[in-house]
């Protein structure tokens, strides 16, 4: 079959050009498709790299060019001072390099050649500079090139809807089989400006009706308004305030209407996208258009999956390697060793909670080696991280610059526990965790749905467990997660000291699971999906993931239940006195329905929670309850006028 990988960034063929993990993922997949005997190519932006590429590759200038004036509708509230329709003149050409037998088409124009260092325009340009429209221009140029030069019946594989929301509609009706892969857990209700979408579709002769009926219904009850004001801080939800002329439509709903399959990196990521289960967003999500669109097309939802590099699948773990690595770092090989490897992103990766949790561990007298690699473009000014290295020089090694794979393999193979307290459900597969596990490191990580394929469990001695699962977190600077990291590591260090046989079992399971995620297996799943698309059959026959989600909801229902009987709210002279009792509750918050107002956390005393909040004009309070396992549920608590019980 013919397969064209189309993405804004396709630079994994050169390690020095990689900006994000998606490029590495794409290059691994493309080579597997090639090795399976398929005709594979790529379409991407040149990003101003043609002079650099000419130093290593033969760059062929293709006889394809477009000149076009493209009307881009701009939201006046987001683009003040700009016309409502901005006409962009696009003059683009195509070039080609061939790497390892794979043809890579590079689309070049004045705008597409900007930002060669980052590829992506800075976020702060949005609403201020048309250069922010570079990803949109790529979609227009890529659609024109694919329609002009790629043969019909080709599978066009797109990556990350945020960077291809126009492409499926622009390619529809031209004989292609379009598959979209959702790479990240961006807010599932992310929207795009409807007039922009319809204008570009119309300009390129595509069906504009694909964008119809994709707005959300009114969400204006007291509880709705409280949820809408609170949820953006969880990164699960992006709010779009209603205003005159407001016309925003669901991005994922738009994409799935024009593709033959929508793919996810893991079954847990797909589960999360379909349900938002057990998160603070679950109840509001039930009302949104994006849920309706996804659930009405479950036969198009598939899991192609992800993998770790083949070079991580057979890393030897020996006592000699451990001793050499740790003594070379000035550490004691007799101590248990903790490992973390990720880009420096203190909230997304839960690193603030990681640093503080390790600090509590060491301050409490536990002794262990700590290996931290937090890759940053420049040394971060992080007092928590700096203090760890400064106050425990005999135990902690922290690196924020680049590290090569050989050194990282040594660190992973020398470690006993790999710690990944990622937050906001943003990690959809987490290759670094799989790499560490493949080296025999036992995971201690949050129970994100997108990472559940690694089989860590809340009870690490449970059957088939590979390690310890910590509660999910959707908070900035989450002290509950900090304490969970601390207590989780205490628990695993005790196990290391007192039950070496259990540790050996966990290590063997972690290694086996980590090494099971191969690119060959992922490519095989994709090829099955592509073949189904070509045959006109249901792509979802390739995976049981969606059926499992639907069957679970049919059996168990959706969402936790709010029990108002656990709480009471009584009006007093200076506000409302609130009490809550919950045996398995970790946090109770009263959330105002005013945008920007702060939630009030009730004070905890064992299973009792209490506090005083300002007056409730609606006669009811919006309450968010979080259980100790991280599950959340919203509800309303009526405010009574009689005196509270003593």
Image (tube, grey):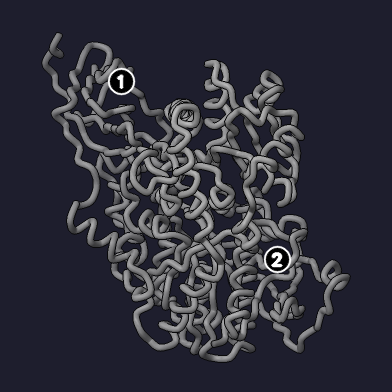
The residue beneath circle 1 is 614
Q: From the viewer's perspective, tell me whether residue 5 is left or right of residue 131.
A: left
Residue in front for this viewpoint, 555 or 571: 555
Q: Which mark is residue 137?
A: none
Is residue 531 visible in the rendered image? The answer is: yes
Helix, strand or loop for disc 2: loop
Q: Residue at x 72, y 55 (%)?
A: 118
Decide: few, some or many residues near mark 1? Use Cα within 10 Å; few <14, some 14-19, many ≥20.
few
Looking at the picture, does residue 316 appear above or below residue 136?
A: above
The residue carrying pointer 2 sits among few (fewer than 14), some (14 to 19) or many (20 or more) residues within 10 Å by Cα, namely many
Total numbered labels placed on residues in the image = 2
Tell me, for residue 11, which label it has, or none.
2
- Residue 73 appears in the picture as rendered: no
- Residue at (46%, 73%) from the top-left corner? 525
In which image quadrant can residue 634 be found? top left
Relative vertical location of residue 136 with respect to residue 335 in this rendering, above or below: below
Query: Is residue 296 or residue 532 the one in the foreground?
Result: 532
Classify 405 as above or below 3: above
Residue 483 sits in which quadrant? top left
From the top left corner, tell me how far across and down residue 144 is, in percent.
Answer: 61, 82
Q: Are marks 1 and 2 in contact (CB under 8 Å)?
A: no
Residue at image location 27% in from the left, 12% down from the top: 574
Horizontal and vertical percent position of residue 286:
27, 53
Q: In which quadrant will I find the C terminus?
A: top left
Q: Earlier in the sequence, mark 1 or mark 2?
A: 2
């Amino acid at each position: 079959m013919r397969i064209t990988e189309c993405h804004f960034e396709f630079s994994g063929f050169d390690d020095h050009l990689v900006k994000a993990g998606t490029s590495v993922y794409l290059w691994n997949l493309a080579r597997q498709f090639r090795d399976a005997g398929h005709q594979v190519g790529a379409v991407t932006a040149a990003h101003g790299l043609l002079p650099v590429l000419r130093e290593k590759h033969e760059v062929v200038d293709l006889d394809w060019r477009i000149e076009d004036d493209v009307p881009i509708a701009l939201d006046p509230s987001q683009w003040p001072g700009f016309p409502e329709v901005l006409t962009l003149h696009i003059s683009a050409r195509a070039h080609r390099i061939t790497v390892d037998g794979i043809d890579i088409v590079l689309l070049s124009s004045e705008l597409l050649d900007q930002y060669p260092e980052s590829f992506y325009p800075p976020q702060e340009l949005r609403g201020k500079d048309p250069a922010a429209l570079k990803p949109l221009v790529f979609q227009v140029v890529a659609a024109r090139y694919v329609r002009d030069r790629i043969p019909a019946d080709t599978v066009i594989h797109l990556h990350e809807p945020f960077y291809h929301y126009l492409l499926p509609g622009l390619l529809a009706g031209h004989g292609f089989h379009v598959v979209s892969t959702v790479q990240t857990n961006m807010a599932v209700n992310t929207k795009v400006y409807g007039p922009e979408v319809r204008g570009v579709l119309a300009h390129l002769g595509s069906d504009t009706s694909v964008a119809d009926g994709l707005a959300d219904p009114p969400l204006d009850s007291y509880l709705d308004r409280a949820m809408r004001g609170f949820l953006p801080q969880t990164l699960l939800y992006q709010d779009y305030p209603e205003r005159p002329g407001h016309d925003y439509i669901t991005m994922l709903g738009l994409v799935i209407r024009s593709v033959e399959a929508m793919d996810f990196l893991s079954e847990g990521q797909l589960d999360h996208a379909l349900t938002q289960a057990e998160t603070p967003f679950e109840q509001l999500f039930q009302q949104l258009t994006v849920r309706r669109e996804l659930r009405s097309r479950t036969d198009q939802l598939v899991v192609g999956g992800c993998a770790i590099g083949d070079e991580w699948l057979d890393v030897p773990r020996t006592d000699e390697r451990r001793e050499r690595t740790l003594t070379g770092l000035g550490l004691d090989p007799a101590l248990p060793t903790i490992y973390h490897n990720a880009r420096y992103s203190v909230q997304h990766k839960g690193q603030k909670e990681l640093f503080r949790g390790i600090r509590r561990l060491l301050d409490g007298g536990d002794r262990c080696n700590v290996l931290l690699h937090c890759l940053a473009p420049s040394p971060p000014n992080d007092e928590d991280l700096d203090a760890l290295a400064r106050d425990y020089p005999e135990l902690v090694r922290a690196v924020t610059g680049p590290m090569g794979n050989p050194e990282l393999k040594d660190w992973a193979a020398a470690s006993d526990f790999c710690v990944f307290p990622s937050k906001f459900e943003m990690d959809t597969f987490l290759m670094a965790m799989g790499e560490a596990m493949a080296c025999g490191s036992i995971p201690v990580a949050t129970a994100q749905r997108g990472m559940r394929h690694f089989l860590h469990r809340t009870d690490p001695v449970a059957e088939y467990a590979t390690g310890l699962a910590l509660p999910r977190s959707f908070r900035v600077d989450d002290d509950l997660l900090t304490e969970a990291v601390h207590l989780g590591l205490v628990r695993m260090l005790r196990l290391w000291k007192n039950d070496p046989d259990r540790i050996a079992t966990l290590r063997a399971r972690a290694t086996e699971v980590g090494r099971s995620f191969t690119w060959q297996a992922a490519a095989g799943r994709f090829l099955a999906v592509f073949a189904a698309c070509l045959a006109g059959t249901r792509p979802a026959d390739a995976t049981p993931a969606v059926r499992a989600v639907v069957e679970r909801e049919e059996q168990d229902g959706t969402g936790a239940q709010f029990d108002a009987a656990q709480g009471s709210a009584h009006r007093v002279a200076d506000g409302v006195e609130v009490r809550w009792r919950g045996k398995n509750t970790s946090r109770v918050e009263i959330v105002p329905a005013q945008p920007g107002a702060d939630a009030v956390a009730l004070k905890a005393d064992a299973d009792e929670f209490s506090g005083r909040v300002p007056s409730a004009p609606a006669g009811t309070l919006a309450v968010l309850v979080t259980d100790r396992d991280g599950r959340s549920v919203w509800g309303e608590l009526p405010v009574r006028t009689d005196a509270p019980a003593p």
